[in-house]
Image (cartoon, rainbow, N blue to C red):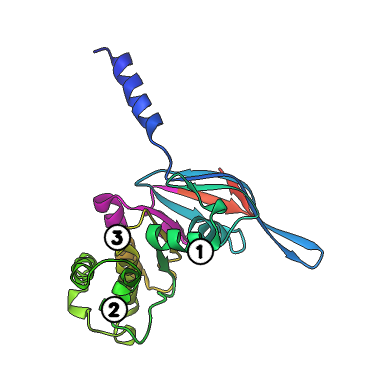
Amino acid sequence: MSDAISESRVDAAIDSVQPLVAIRSLSKYYTRGDQIIPVLLDIDLDVFPGDFVALMGPSGSGKSTLLNLIAGIDKPSSGELRIGGVDIVLLADVDLAAWRAANVGFIFQFYNLMPVLTAYQNIELPLMLTSLSRTERRERVEMALALVGLTDRQDHYPNELSGGQEQRVAIARALITDPLLIVADEPTGDLDRVTAAEILGLLDRLNRELGKTIIMVTHDPKAAEAAHRMIHLEKGVLVH
């Protein structure tokens, strides 16, 4: 087989991979009285399966807004946003909530754990909306705890955990439904450098070993280095 034929087949294989996230002409604006406030302007973006993307930009650039749109937390003013082939812009609110629960895992800067629940119970919480049996839920939670290295902390409440341990619980909770996509909004923003490096290492492992697609908002260039590629936003516009 000639090198030219081999290269053409490789190119064809690459071209056949469909983006997991396909954004076309996406805009978001808010109104304040008669004033229109643009936040995102005509965004085009593809994120492929197994990618690890860092969204960067100064405060007010629109990066968290874009992440919320991708996660189905908010809806755009115009444009197309397909995830796994589904244009989530067209979904009714109740259908969007069901889609989000099944397909998106969330990691937040301040963890968003329920203080009255143990680490085990916080991780199990998203599974309570599924048809899994108690035994099946336990198996998943135990696997997630082992993955993030917190098996010995499963009965601890959030106020009994360090910030890094709380974020590990949040990561395990994000993984528990085996989502298509993990979105992380400043996941290391409240952590010291050493703990932040541990969390970024864990995200890298989830990406490399489990093939998880991750979109992470960060203002920290050091954190962004963990990603495969960086995407910059300036005043609501993608800067290449």
Specify the quadrant of the image occupied by residue 158. Answer: bottom left
Which quadrant is home to the N terminus? Answer: top left
Pair 2/3: label in front: 2
Q: As drawn, is 63 to the left or to the right of 169? A: right
Q: Amino acid at mark 3?
A: Gly
Specify the quadrant of the image occupied by residue 61. Answer: bottom right
Which is more N-terminal, label 3 or label 2? 2
Q: Residue 141 at what x, y percent from top left?
A: 23, 70
Range drawn in magenta: 202-229
Residue that badge 1 annotates: 94
Specify the quadrant of the image occupied by residue 76. Answer: bottom right
Q: Residue 240 at what x, y percent from top left?
A: 55, 42
Q: Secondary structure at mark 3?
A: helix
Q: Amino acid at mark 2?
A: Gln
In this view, the residue in front, 162 or 192, is 162
Mark 2 surroundings within 10 Å by alpha-carbon count, few (fewer than 14), some (14 through 19), many (20 or more): many
Q: Residue at x 29, y 75 (%)?
A: 165
The reply to whether the magenta stretch includes residue 149 is no
Residue that badge 2 annotates: 121
The disc at residue 201 is: 3
Q: Residue at x 55, y 58 (%)?
A: 92
Residue 24 visible in the picture: yes
